Amino acid sequence: MRTLRIIPMVLAVLLMAGCAAKRDHDHGAAGDHDHGKGAAAAGHLHGTALTGTVTYRQRVALMPDAIVKVWLQDISRPGLPVPEILDEQEIRRPGQVPVAFSLHYDPATIDPTHTYTLLARIYEGDRTRFTNAKPFPVLTNGACADQCEVVVDMMQ
């Protein structure tokens, strides 16, 4: 009789473990991914994804504790001290390049007269090791709209 009570508990634990493994697979277990707040959270639920990779040309390995950050930004408003961030993603322990990213935005908020860019940086410890020196245009004016390859340059 005691065995009959244990079987449902074991099945429940196995079911929860299976769901957790599926969630980890769906969110990419190669590195820890974290999206920003605000517009990013809303876009993640109801928007469109801008995907791509961050890579570099140098033949060096990333440290295990590296962090890759990618921002989708609107650089069209000259009066702002910093660009408007539409979404951002932080990837901890990304492994080696290329590192995949996925940024979310609401297509209804994209103004075809604006200029949108990606900014990508790779951090190791407290220093920026790689960044894209030139803006990487996306979404408007015939620029990349998906599967973008952002090549970052080594900082000196």
Image (cartoon, rainbow, N blue to C red):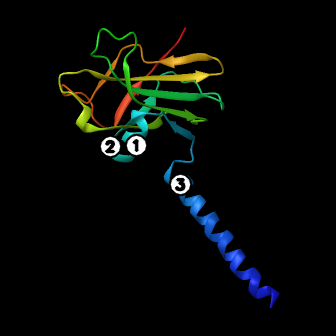
Q: Quadrant of residue 41?
A: top left
Mark 2, other Cα within 10 Å: few <14 / some 14–19 / many ≥20: some
Q: Secondary structure at mark 1?
A: helix
Image position of 17 with respect to 121: above or below:
below
Which disc, if any, is residue 47?
A: 2
The CA span between labels 1 and 2 is 6 Å
Image position of 6 with respect to 145: above or below:
below
Q: Secondary structure at mark 2?
A: loop
The CA span between labels 3 and 2 is 21 Å
Which disc, if any, is residue 100?
A: none
Q: Quadrant of residue 78?
A: top left
Q: For the view shown, which residue lies furthest in the right direction? A: 2
Image position of 129 with respect to 149: above or below:
above
Tell me whether the residue at label 3 lies in contact with that at label 2, contact meaning CB atoms closer than 8 angstroms: no
> Which residue position holds label 3?
25
Q: Secondary structure at mark 3?
A: helix
- At horizontal 60% and vertical 65% (from top left) the residue drawn is 18
- At horizontal 56% and vertical 44% (from top left) the residue drawn is 30
Tell me whether the residue at label 1 lies in contact with that at label 2, contact meaning CB atoms closer than 8 angstroms: yes
> Which residue position holds label 1?
44
